[in-house]
Amino acid sequence: MTVGIVVVSHSRALADAAVALAGEMVAGGAVPLEVAAGLDDGGFGTDAVAISEAVAGADQGDGVVVLMDLGSAVLSAELALELVDDEVRERAVLCPAPLVEGLVVAAVSAAGGASRAEVAAEAADALLAKQGHLGAAPEEAGPGRATTGAEETASFTVGMPHGLHARPAAALVQALRGLDADVRLRNVTVDGPEVSGASLSRVATLGALQGHEIAVRAHGGDAAEAVRRLLALAGDDFGESAAVAAPAPAVTGRPVPASPGIGIGPVRAGGATGVVVPAPVPGDQRRRLDEARAGVRDHLQAVRDRAAREIGAAEAAIFDAQVLLLDDPEVVADVVARLEAGTDAARAWADALDDVADRLAGAADEYLRARAADVRDVRDQVLRALGGVAPDDTAGDGVLVADDLTPAEAAVLDPARTPAVVLAGSSPTAHAAILLRARGVPAVVGVGAALAARAREAGVLAVDGSTGEVVADPDAATLADFRARADALTRHRDEAARRAHEPAVTRDGTTVLVGVNVGSPADARAGVGADLAGLVRTEFGFLDRHEAPSVDEQEAAYRAIGKALDGRRMTLRTLDVGGDKPLDYLPMPAEANPFLGVRGIRLALARPQLLADQLQAIVRVTHDHPVDVMFPMVADVDELAAARRALDEAVDAVGRGRPADLRVGIMVEVPAAALKAAAFAPDVDFFSIGTNDLTQYTLAAERGNDAVAALADALDPGVLALIAATAQGAGDDVLVAVCGELAGDEQAAALLLGLGVRELSVAPGSVATVKQAVRDVDLARARELATAALACPDAAAVRALLA
């Protein structure tokens, strides 16, 4: 058994972030951890009943340490202990430690087998590192030294670029757990005091940076083993080599086409300059700030809505987080305190947000460090508003060259002012790349730091987003070639648009359906020439609400899309949310890896009423409009069976019999589903392959993680093999579709058809051109192309084959 931990916070987002950070420190160590944060309506606050349930859930017999953020959280926690059983109350400790630092230390201590008292004591000392850095070094108060056994000494040099920060310090403490040894460490380089190696909070006070020498002194029966373990850890950079390695794009420097089209223009370097804090302005500073925040809030909401329609709810979540930051009570309280002290609104906001960004930038977790850029983005937007600068006025003209783009940055690019984008990092399936395609901005990604640096120094860039070519300062002949390509592309798109309403038939006479991915009636109308809606993202109706939509509301929404399609079939994907796409009114426990957690059909089956209501709305509509219902994230045949039972129950509840035009399918996003397609085939009418998720699961590369995004290439032969396996398992009677981003890649059309795909569902703007690409395909040659692609060693080879 292990000591449990309960996190009590006014903010669910804050608690989840703190838990994620603590999870980075206890890799491989299971700690019973419960979160009681926020209110059921998604607002800020604490609930004594929820805290009491969390305490009971975390208690496994060794006791519970409760950590709280501030104010009423303490009172709520005290009340919560009155609500639990006597024996549980006796094993619970309310710890006065700071929430974030205390949780990190408590998790490491608990994972290492420390007692309840030891966990609480370690957490309470969690601020020692800051105190030692900002003031006098704290007195050593660690465990008493062992007096038996010979003394062992050694030293090591810190090799990690970020020094002996929280994560390697946690590894050090865990390595010493259970040994009969008192280990003392001293930073020789700064001539610091000795500290106990058994205490994470004490190790953190060493202030050990890269290149610093650390002396080790150990006493006790296991002193030699303790020293051996520490030297071995130090030799492996405390497991940090992988964590601090440069992102793959900067190493490989392999340009990858990410958004088709030709772009020529002067260079505009991105990410080099920040926003200058506007000069003080007389007046009511609180009112000025509130008005600026309100304007930015409206702008972010508009950008978020557009991103949700164009790339999906998960990708739009970044804007939700930024809106929350605008209204974060702790941030606002900090700013107000500065205003009351006489600071101008712009300076107060800038300083407060800089503090938040600096804390995130110094976090051990790479994801949290990356969020510092999101905070600075919000900071700058409010400062622009305070300075009277409209959001669109911040954009420049020319080919944008940057290390990377956030979805927020990509969402506001004006194609008329940005002929193309070149990124050192990123991947074709990254959220920013998807937005660039949706907005028609040519893009090449993954070019690497060296090529990006040369591109920034050029006067003019010529970019081909279809082939991945980037030419700096092209000569007259090269420039003429690019312009000729651009003219040819324009003619090709004009021809495609002219024939948009014609069927997509291959040269040998095979008809391929080309659908549109939609989230609203406007999207459906924008997909000119689409044969159907191959994917309707129904989760849009569940967002920005405090309760789930009713059956009537859902029915009306689906009918509106059906009307926009003018009778064409639509594929309604059931609610696809979960740990990585949370809803305010569906509180869920924190998950160490939400992408592998309760998502899609897993969540729907766990919330049967939610699924029942949605299926009833779908059945109602299907009596008047041809509908495919599609279940997401299916990995097991039992999940499909349960979903079909729920659909049958919805048919009975509606009471009009089974609609004649109702068909059933599943998303193939999990590799297991592709490999077991034959087992699913008897119970479905179609498979729809979501190449975005299938790619990240197959290659273990989250497309939202900049460090590995370049690996997430849907043309990797491993992903293609799973598409082929799906088609093989489907047989002759089950249609195979692709609704992920790969479906919109014109160059990939022949390859997908050669693998057995017979429906492609794409973004509204790509319908006509993908249809035209299908018309150029000869299936016999396409099958040969698919065979060759499956034999390629990597995605780069596949792209070369397609070119």
Image: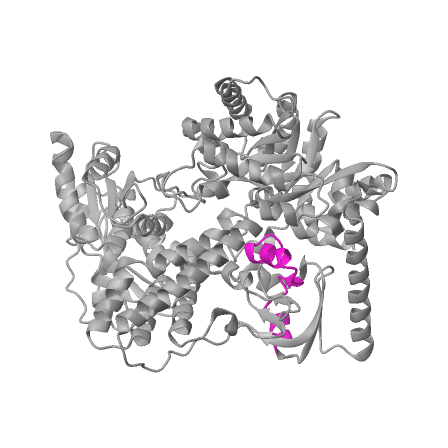
Q: Residue at coordinates 48% horizontally, 57% vertically from top-left?
A: 302
x, y percent for residue 359 = 33, 64
Residue 422 visible (yes or no): yes
Q: Is residue 652 left or right of residue 288?
A: right
> Relative to residue 266, is residue 255 depicted above or below?
above
> Relative to residue 731, is residue 334 depicted above or below?
below
Given residues 481 and 359, the one toward you in this image is 481
Say if the magenta span includes residue 450: yes
Q: Residue at coordinates 44% horizontally, 33% vertically from top-left?
A: 603
Say if the magenta span includes residue 4: no
Q: Residue at coordinates 29% horizontally, 67% vertically from top-left?
A: 207
Q: Is residue 11 left or right of residue 505?
A: left
x, y percent for residue 277 = 37, 78
> Relative to residue 476, is residue 720 depicted above or below?
above
Given residues 214 and 305, the one toward you in this image is 305
Provide the residue span drawn in magenta. 427-456
Residue 794 visible (yes or no): no
Quadrant containing the C terminus in the rendered view: bottom right
